[in-house]
Amino acid sequence: MKTEAWTSVNLKESIENLCKAARQAARALARTDAAHIDAGLEAIAQELEKRKTFIQEENARDVEAAEAKGTPKSTVDRLRLNDKAFAQMVLGIRQIIALPSPLGAVLSERIRPNGLVIRKKRVPLGVIGFIYESRPNVTIDAAVLCLKAGNATILRGGSDAFRSNMALAAAIKEGLHHAGLPEAAIQLVETTEREAVPVLCRQSDYVDLLIPRGGESLIRTVMEHARMPVIKHYHGVCHIYVHAAADFDLAERIVINAKCQKPGVCNSAETLLIDEGAAKEFVPRIVKALRDHNVEVRGDERTVELAGAALRAEVIPTTEADWTTEYLDLIISVRVVPSLEAAVAHMDKYGSHHSDAIVTTDEAAANRFFELADSSALYWNASTRFTDGFEFGFGAEIGISTDKIHARGPMGLEELTSYKYVVTGTGQIRS
């Protein structure tokens, strides 16, 4: 699937032209004040509101096509731009407008013995390539966050949302035009050809950073071909560990929320680990609660044994593959572990270091968990569903980084910037 404009020249040339234009736009944005950028964001919001009917019609075509080819319901739900989702998308833009600009902030200042004043100032990254799947609202989140941080953006969405993304990109372009900002500041790769991803990954002369957000095959393709830095939004195999000293009422609420509130997202829980000290009482209780919420329960031998005669048939024995699977559905794997250390060892071996939680009334155990576990977000007595830029107070987010360098966890405005040193002297020379 592609637009007519992309059939006149080859794919490589089309993407290279896009990237060159983005580089020029990035230079212009770096000299644009925060108020002008905010005006551009408001113009985009207004243009989306004007075009709501058309955008939703194009989105309905995407949804219909996805349903016709048997796309899982959870994925279709993420694709759908109903009135509520559309309103939240536009509201998200205005919430980002209300946030202070990160640009120009002095991160540190020091005066050297020779009198040199060295300041570290926040600046845009430049050109960001964002490669993602489904969820057309991500098109807007990524575009406006990058723009607020002074960056130009190249968006490459998935085939499932192609019509939706084209309609959204047209609104963005018109909003930029009305605000007098370079239209190349936010551009969409207007084809779903798979070769577009490797080609974009090779544009290191023009693109400063790539952010892939999607399934494992997409991430691996980007990592294999990228010639510039990459920040991964990798899959979310998130864990809830119910400690021996857990409040079982609290644990049940957290597990049900983390699994059921929105199962098709990366911060939902995929594995439940139950301490041996809590297992005899908690296993049958949580298996029943999960089944009451239509969750398919897959359990290790100890979980099957402790589920009891009435529930044993409700638990499907796990395979080794279950522990590394991001279900994105009403399915959860359950394992009984002998200790907190064993729980963390399980997370290290099978998890994605996205979001993990402990439920306990023992503060020392919680602190030990925080010390040992190595994930982008760790929780004590709270659902993993809070790993989200909005919930963290960042406005929106461009993704959840599972890397450790530059950005980790929800990526908001600050994570979309770099810095430079500005040094003021009075004639100092080095001897």
Image: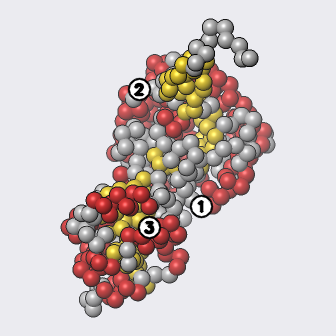
Residue 169 relative to residue 338: left or right: right
At label 3, the amino acid type is Val
Front: mark 1 or 2: 2
- Residue at 66%, 30% in the rendered image: 22
Work out how far the residue at label 3 is from the one at label 1, CA to CA, in angstroms: 23 Å
- In the depicted view, which residue is nearer to us: 294 or 320? 320
Where's residue 427, x and y in %?
Answer: 66, 8
Give SS at disc 3. Answer: helix
Residue underneath mark 2: 100
Q: Secondary structure at mark 2?
A: loop
What is the x, y in percent for residue 291? Answer: 30, 76
Question: In the structure shown, which secondary structural element does the residue marked by tag 1 occupy?
Answer: helix
Quarter of the image for the C terminus: give it: top right
* As drawn, 58 above or below 263: above
Mark 2–mark 3 Cα distance, whole angstroms, equals 38 Å
Residue under the point 54% across and 65% down: 69
Above-or-below relation of 414 to 325: above
Please report whichever mark, 3 or 1, sits nearer to the chain's N-terminal start: 1
Residue in front for this viewpoint, 311 or 89: 311
- Residue 332 shows up from this direction: no
User: Of the residues shown, which amino acid type is indicated by label 1?
Assistant: Glu
Mark 1 vs 2, N-terminal side: 2
Q: Residue 366: which quarter of the image?
A: bottom left
**Residue 393 horizontal/vertical position (percent):** 36, 39
**Mark 2 or 3, nearer chain start:** 2
